[in-house]
Amino acid sequence: MPIFIHNPEAPLLLAAGLWATDGTFTIITVKGKDAAGEVHDRMPMLLDDTLLGDWLNPAGLSPKDGTALLKEVRDGSDRIAGRLGTRPVTRELNNVRTVRRDDPTLLDPVELVAF
């Protein structure tokens, strides 16, 4: 069953990642916490929007400043994880060939049926 993981206080979750000059990228993951940890043992390291500018423009940071920024991002990720909520949503999300990505009903809660 697909699970919608969201922050009820914010419309977007920002994930910390690294981009390489060859166009590849990676999302930094951490141990799943709180509601996200109930769904999976790993989760993206979430980025507090107040740190977005520093994360996206680290030019000129010394290694010490970079280490401090990473700690701030990690601490912020833990705070955001504590606000996350989850709910089951339709299985239609699993079919990438036919799903209408602009259909807002895809995120409507569904009831789980016990067998």
Image: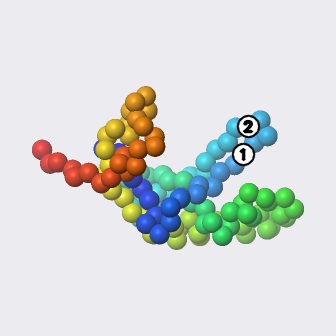
Write down the residue under mark 1. 19
Q: Is residue 13 left or right of residue 89?
A: right
Determine the image quadrant of residue 25.
Answer: top right
Give percent across and percent down for residue 31.
50, 57
Taking the spot 68% from the left edge, 67% from the top edge, the residue there is: 51
Q: Residue at x 35, y 48 (%)?
A: 105
Task: Answer with left or right where residue 65 lies relative to residue 76.
Answer: right
Q: Position of residue 74 (x, y in %)?
A: 61, 65
State the image coordinates of residue 62 (x, y, percent, origin top left).
85, 64
| Residue 70, visible in the rendered structure | no
Residue 24 on image: x %, y %? 70, 38
* Callout 1 amino acid: Trp
Tell me the residue at 79%/40% (across/down): 21
Crowding at dot 1, Cα within 10 Å, few <14 / some 14-19 / many 20+, comes out as few
**Label 2 with label 1: CB-CB less than 8 Å:** yes
**Above or below for 79 versus 41:** below
- Describe the element under mark 2 as helix, strand or loop: loop
Comparing 107 with 7, the one in front is 107
The image's mark for residue 86 is: none
Q: Is residue 96 above or below residue 16?
A: above
Q: Quadrant of the N terminus?
A: top left
Q: Nearer the viewer, residue 29 or 48?
A: 48
Residue indicated by mark 2: 23
Of 86 and 106, nearer the camera is 106
Residue type, numbered disc 2: Gly
Query: Element type at marker 1?
Result: strand
Task: State the image quarter where residue 101 is shown.
Answer: top left
Tell me the residue at 74%/57% (across/down): 56
Mark 2 to mark 1 CA distance (whole Å): 7 Å
Graded by Cα atoms within 10 Å as few (under 14), some (14 to 19) or many (20 or more), the crowding at tag 2 reads few
Tag count in the figure? 2
